[in-house]
Image: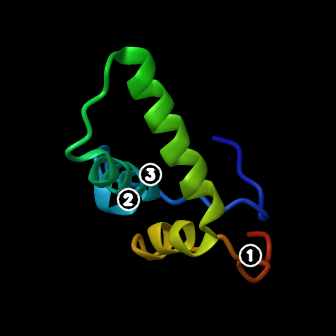
Amino acid sequence: MASAYWVTVIRLPAYAPDLNPTEGVWRWMKRGLTNTAARGVDHLAQLVKRRLRACQQQTDLLAGFLASTGMTLGPEPPRQPER
């Protein structure tokens, strides 16, 4: 496996929903669609798209999904190459 000093590899378990911010998005999505009766697949797709667009507009909500995993998007301090 090739390595570079500017790449940080973090090995995650094969199934780790608590480390996946997408799980928070889907949980939020399902909660918003509870008690909604879609008239068909096309209507359901429209509802999901509308809900995802609403999610995109709420940056604090998205930041919360990421924060719940304990991970960050911020850069890590530079590491020195191994010799």
Residue visible at 33% across and 52% down in the picture = 32
Instruction: Looking at the picture, tell me which residue is in the foreground, 8 or 50.
Output: 50
Residue 22, numbered label? 3
Position of residue 14 relative to residue 23, above or below, is above
Measure the C-alpha gap from mark 3 to mark 1. 21 Å
Q: x%, y% of residue 69?
A: 41, 70
Q: Do the residues bearing badges 3 and 1 touch, measured as CB atoms within 8 Å?
A: no
Residue visible at 60% across and 48% down in the picture = 53
**Residue designated by label 1:** 75
Q: Counting other residues with Cα less than 10 Å from the Cα at mark 3, is it few (<14), some (14-19), or many (20 or more)?
A: some
Residue 54, numbered label? none
Position of residue 23 relative to residue 50, above or below, is below
Q: Is residue 13 left or right of residue 52?
A: left
Q: x%, y% of residue 8?
A: 64, 63
Q: Do the residues bearing badges 2 and 3 touch, measured as CB atoms within 8 Å?
A: yes
Measure the C-alpha gap from mark 2 to mark 1. 23 Å
Instruction: Looking at the picture, tell me which residue is in the foreground, 8 or 54.
Output: 54
Instruction: Looking at the picture, tell me which residue is in the foreground, 30 or 24.
Output: 30
Q: Is residue 13 left or right of residue 78?
A: left
Q: Is residue 74 left or right of residue 34?
A: right
**Which three-letter amino acid code belongs to the residue tagged 3?**
Thr
Which of the 4 image quarters holds residue 81? bottom right
Q: If the image is split into quadrants, where does the C terminus sit?
A: bottom right
**Mark 3 or 1, closer to the camera:** 3
**Residue designated by label 2:** 24
